[in-house]
Amino acid sequence: MGGFILRIALGATFIIHGLAKLQEGIATVIERFANYDLPYPELLAYGVTGLEIIGGIFLIIGFSIRLFAFLFMLLMAGAIATVKYSTGFLHGYELDVALMAMAAYLFFASNRFLALDNFISEGKQKKNK
């Protein structure tokens, strides 16, 4: 049950961050990423925004939990390494570490309580019998 709560909280957090990027305008996000000297800021802006929204939804419904947990771990590691590390832990990357830890738990534990993945794997098992 704890993993389910983490899935919902993590998914909702990423959805809200992705929607905030859309609300401020993808051009603004591209400009911000370019100011961070990130390579391919246009591609990254669309990719990060899409990952946050789609990945967040998929975590909430429990679809491809490990995949999206892994992608969120990479996203947070990238954000820390490229943007937030220089600001320090407090008021810098503490939230990113917490989100990465939540994603790591889901990646390693792959909690499937109330997850769509359960129905998919059950269907595969029934086909194989």
Image: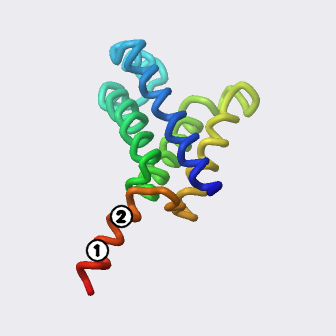
Instruction: Work out which quarter of the rendered image holds the C terminus and state it.
Output: bottom left
Give the camera-side residue of 85 and 92.
92
Q: Can you identify the residue that label 2 sits on?
A: 119
Q: Residue at x 50, y 40 (%)?
A: 11
Residue 117 place in picture, x, y as percent: 39, 61
Give the camera-side residue of 5 and 49.
5
In this rendering, position of residue 99 left or right of residue 67: right
Residue 124's disc number: 1
Of all residues, the one furthest to the left in this rendering is 127
Q: Residue at x 32, y 65 (%)?
A: 120
Check disc 2 and give the amino acid type: Phe
**Mark 2–mark 1 contact, CB under 8 Å?**
no
Q: Earlier in the sequence, mark 2 or mark 1?
A: 2
Tag 1's secondary structure?
helix
Q: Residues within 10 Å of mark 1 (few under 14, many from 20)?
A: few
Instruction: Work out which quarter of the rendered image holds the N terminus and state it.
Output: bottom right
Residue 11 vertical placement versus 66 (above, below): above
Q: Residues within 10 Å of mark 2 (few under 14, many from 20)?
A: few
Check disc 1 and give the amino acid type: Lys
Residue 118 vertical placement versus 54 (above, below): below
Give residue 88's quadrant in the image.
top right
Question: How many numbered markers are drawn?
Answer: 2
Give the camera-side residue of 99 and 117.
117
Residue 105 place in picture, x, y as percent: 60, 57
Residue 51's disc number: none
Residue 81 vertical placement versus 2 (above, below): above
Residue 73 place in picture, x, y as percent: 53, 48
Q: Residue at x 43, y 28 (%)?
A: 18
